[in-house]
Amino acid sequence: MRRMKDGQASKPRPASSLRAPEPLRVTTFEAGCDTFAILSFPVDELKLPDALSAAEKAVCRLLLTGASNAEIARQRRTSVRTVANQVAAILKKLGAGSRSELPMVLARRSSAAAGGLS
């Protein structure tokens, strides 16, 4: 039993009873005696700026997944130094101050290209 905010006890719902509206997907897993749910939904393919080379676009997509330079180098079968140079070029070309700022910069560019506010 778990306690709700109002102090009432409530039974946790079994993972099999969780249903997500389309296109939202729910994946559940258990850790110890807790059940966790991960909610996800499909997104349109990200249109990266034409200013980036094909290799930079591939690296940029991996950056957006949170991959480290070493992980990107391993996946792309190149050196960590090459990836570091590509990351620096991506950030410079897009005007991002850091890799953590990259998603925000791309979202702004995408919004501006779609006619939204920049």
Image: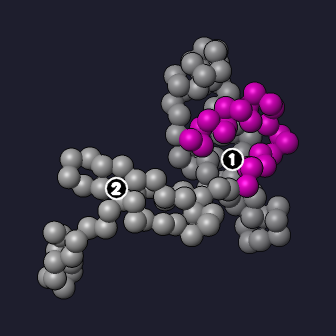
Q: Residue 63, how many percent across, how many down? A: 59, 38
Image side of residue 26 versus residue 6, left or right: right
> Disc 2 residue type?
Phe
Q: In the image, what residue occupies the spot 52% across and 40% down?
A: 66
Q: Residue 56, how many percent across, how many down? A: 73, 32
Looking at this view, name the residue that lies furthest to the bottom.
6
- The answer to whether residue 71 is seen in the rendering is yes
- The answer to whether residue 88 is seen in the rendering is no
Q: Nearer the viewer, residue 117 or 54?
A: 54
Mark 1: give few (<14), some (14-19) or many (20+) Cα within 10 Å: few
Give the vertical position of 9 relative to 27 (above or below).
below
Q: Residue 34, how many percent across, how many down? A: 24, 55
**Which comes before the other along the chain, label 1 or label 2?**
2
Find disc 1 in the rendering and name its residue.
Answer: 95
Q: In the image, what residue occupies the spot 73% across and 55% down?
A: 44
> Disc 1 residue type?
Gly
Image side of residue 42 versus residue 30, left or right: right
| Total numbered circles | 2
Describe the element under mark 2 as helix, strand or loop.
strand
Q: CA distance from mark 1 to mark 2?
A: 37 Å
Image side of residue 14 versus residue 96, left or right: left
Find disc 2 in the rendering and name its residue.
Answer: 36
Q: Which residues are magenta?
A: 44-65
- Circle 1 or circle 2, nearest the eye: 2
